[in-house]
Every structure is written in structure tokens, then in C-alpha cells.
Amino acid sequence: MPTQCVLADEEFLPFKENTFDLVFSSLSLHWINDLPGALRQIYQVLKPDGVFIGAMVGGETLFELRCSLQLAELEREGGFAPHISPYTAVTDLGNLLGQAGFNMLTVDIDEVQVHYPGMLEVMSDLQGMGESNCAWNRKSLLHRDTILAAAAIYKEMYGNEDGSVPATFQILYMIGWKPHESQAKPAKRGSANVSFADLSKINKLPTDHQKNDDKS
């Protein structure tokens, strides 16, 4: 299968409208500055009835590290600054996809816990995988006393019996389709011929076994 590699900015896709049947994104959308704009561009480059499948880091990622750093910084320095990159909440993702024009949406969540010897190993691993704090207004210096206090808080609040600490990564999965006339459409409002109130009567209907007993 012929392939072509393109090095491009995800916020400025260099493709024409109605180009692709499928757009796939894996764990990169949390680095986007303008996520609504990026989703609109993905929508535009898809052909009608094309599908977007993506996975991105969600809002509850690294909540243990975030909470520990905030508590330690409040205690030692009287205030705190963001030290974890901002992530999108799952409650906002469906709205963002809908605003971009996608329909037949599916959004799912998965949480993965990775266990480390301590908080310092968590931070070292994040730095090694290129997932350090990317906020432009981040605080450039974190005092040693604050880091040590945060590590102690981390282990006290979230530590396991074996001495390790968990780091939670929340993954948001999404599927959205570009509309096309061939797609299934919901029935018109008011066209139903069965009332939801009648559903409560279903368990009162006689079963086949009961019918046979009655006949005998």
C-alpha cells in the first residue's frame, strides 16, 4: 500500500476539504492550543460519511501529582501555580465534537494506573516521555523543600502498602462521523407509537410458561 509522510502542524492541516475517508489521532490532541479549531479542520478534510477516531489524555490524568504539588506549595510558599498540563474534561468532549459538525458520536473513558517507587520517579518518567508541563505561564522554579514535601504528601495520601505510588492516566476515546444522506437518522419528534409509560407494564405480561400452565 503506497504511503506518504507529511510533517505538519496539527493546528494548521495542509489538506484540502473532503480529502480523507478516515482521520485517526492517537494521544496528541492534548498538546493542541485551539482544540475546537483543530476538530473543525479535521471535520473539513473528511469526506462526507468519513469518520474521525481519536484518543487523547483526559482531565483526571495525574490528579495525584497535581493535588500533592498544590498542597505542598500552599504549605511551604503560601500559594500554588499550575505544574501539570491542562487537559480536556470528558464532559466537554462530546460538545466540542458536536460543535465541530460531527454526528453519531461515541465517547468512552479508560483509566490506566502505573505504579512507581515515588513521586520523583513519576516526574522523571513524564520528562523522559516529553509530557512535562506545557503551560506558557508555568512557574519556572519549584523549590527543593516543596518537592520533598509534595513527595511525602503523595506517599501519605495515595501510597500503596508495598511503598509504591500510583499515577493515573485517563484516556478519552472518541468517534465522530461527517454527515451524509446515507446515514441512519433519528425518527421525527412525535412519531413514536408506543409510550414510555407502557414500558413499566412489560414485566406484567404473561410468559410462555405461564400461558401453557393456564391452558393445562
Image: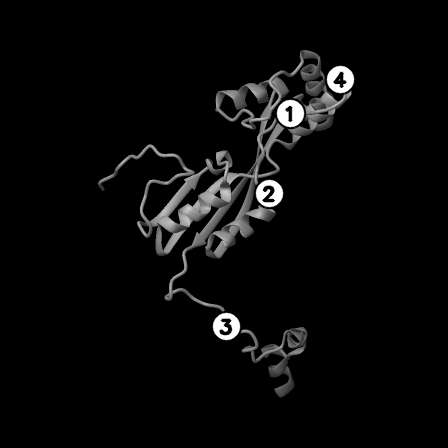
Which circle, 3 or 4, is nearer the viewer? 4
Q: Nearer the viewer, residue 114 or 43?
A: 43
For the residues labelled 1 and 3, the Cα–Cα distance comes to: 50 Å
Query: Where, quadrant-wise, is the C terminus in this rendering?
Result: bottom right
Which badge, 3 or 4, comes first in the chain's sequence?
4
Circle 4 SS class: helix
Which residue is tagged 3?
187
For the residues bearing labels 2 and 4, Cβ distance under 8 angstroms: no
Residue at screen point 64% across, 73% down: 196
Q: Amino acid at mark 1?
A: Val
Residue 118 visible in rendering: no
Which residue is tagged 2?
89
Circle 1 packing at 10 Å, graded few (<14), some (14-19), many (20+), is many
Residue 76 visible in rendering: yes
Q: Quadrant of residue 198?
A: bottom right
Which circle, 4 or 1, is nearer the viewer? 4
For the residues bearing labels 1 and 2, Cβ distance under 8 angstroms: no
Q: Nearer the viewer, residue 116 or 148?
A: 148
Which badge, 3 or 2, comes first in the chain's sequence?
2
Which badge, 1 or 2, comes first in the chain's sequence?
2
Which residue is tagged 1?
165
For the residues labelled 3 and 4, the Cα–Cα distance comes to: 60 Å
For the residues labelled 3 and 2, the Cα–Cα distance comes to: 31 Å
Residue at screen point 62% across, 16% down: 141
Q: Is residue 148 left or right of residue 129?
A: right
The answer to whether 118 is drawn above or below residue 47 in the figure is above
Q: Which mark is residue 76?
A: 4
Residue at screen point 37% across, 40% down: 13
